[in-house]
Amino acid sequence: MKITVINGTPENHSGSLDEYLDRIICSLQKDHEVRQYSLREMKIRPCTGCFHCWIKTPGTCSFKDESQVLCREYISSDLVLYASPLIMGYPSALMKNAMDRMIPLIHPYLEDISGEVHHKKRYKSYPELGLLLEKEEDTDREDTAIVSDLFERAAINVMSRIRFMIFSDSPIEEVSGAINNN
């Protein structure tokens, strides 16, 4: 299985998500092809909503930055693992920016899916998504429900589904098990 890990941990974050993620990746590399992208080390401009990726350059953002690498890796993966600390109850701004820049992966045309209007697929298949999140001190059930809903809705927008959501205080074996057990 090809797994792409997108690490949204910001520079100077005081948590331990990076170390936890390194241990997971080391474990997964025994059986899978794993690539990690650290968003804090990448140059990715914010989406401006120009929609050139739909009209002028279909399927490709007109900004020539590293989001194009992420889009290629995303669409060619079997599973994408989004890893981010929660900051004020939400994934990092780096993660949100990267997710926004996935818009070239869908068509501008709309269709009805289960009574909701969504964009049509641009590609034959899309990866499943896994979430690895680092809680804040005061993260509670309401916070996790909001984050879960946020990612569930984002997954629908990129023709995918959330396979699992796990927090970094869980044993590494739990994350590996969620990835290995379809």
Image (spheres, rainbow, N blue to C red):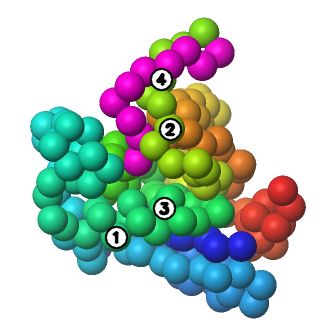
The residue identified by callout 1 is: 69
Local crowd at mark 4 within 10 Å, few (<14), some, or many (≥20)?
A: some
Whole-angstrom CA distance, mark 4 to mark 3, is 19 Å
Give the residue at x 61% y 71%.
3
Mark 1 residue element: helix
Q: Is residue 54 visible?
A: yes
Of badges 2 and 3, the one in the foreground is: 2
Magenta residues (range): 105-114
Mark 4 residue element: strand
Local crowd at mark 3 within 10 Å, few (<14), some, or many (≥20)?
A: many
Quadrant assignment, res 37? bottom left
- The circle on residue 121 is 2
Whole-angstrom CA distance, mark 2 to mark 3, is 14 Å
Local crowd at mark 1 within 10 Å, few (<14), some, or many (≥20)?
A: few
Q: Residue 71: where, in percent of width, then height?
A: 39, 60
Whole-angstrom CA distance, mark 4 to mark 1, is 25 Å
Q: Is residue 174 visible?
A: no
* Residue type at the position of mark 4: His
Q: Is residue 91 above or below residue 147?
A: below
- The circle on residue 118 is 4
Q: Is residue 157 above or below residue 136?
A: above
Local crowd at mark 2 within 10 Å, few (<14), some, or many (≥20)?
A: some
The answer to which of marks 2 and 3 sits earlier in the sequence is 3
Mark 3 residue element: helix
Whole-angstrom CA distance, mark 1 to mark 2, is 19 Å
- The circle on residue 74 is 3
Question: Relative to 136, is 77 on the left or the right?
Answer: right
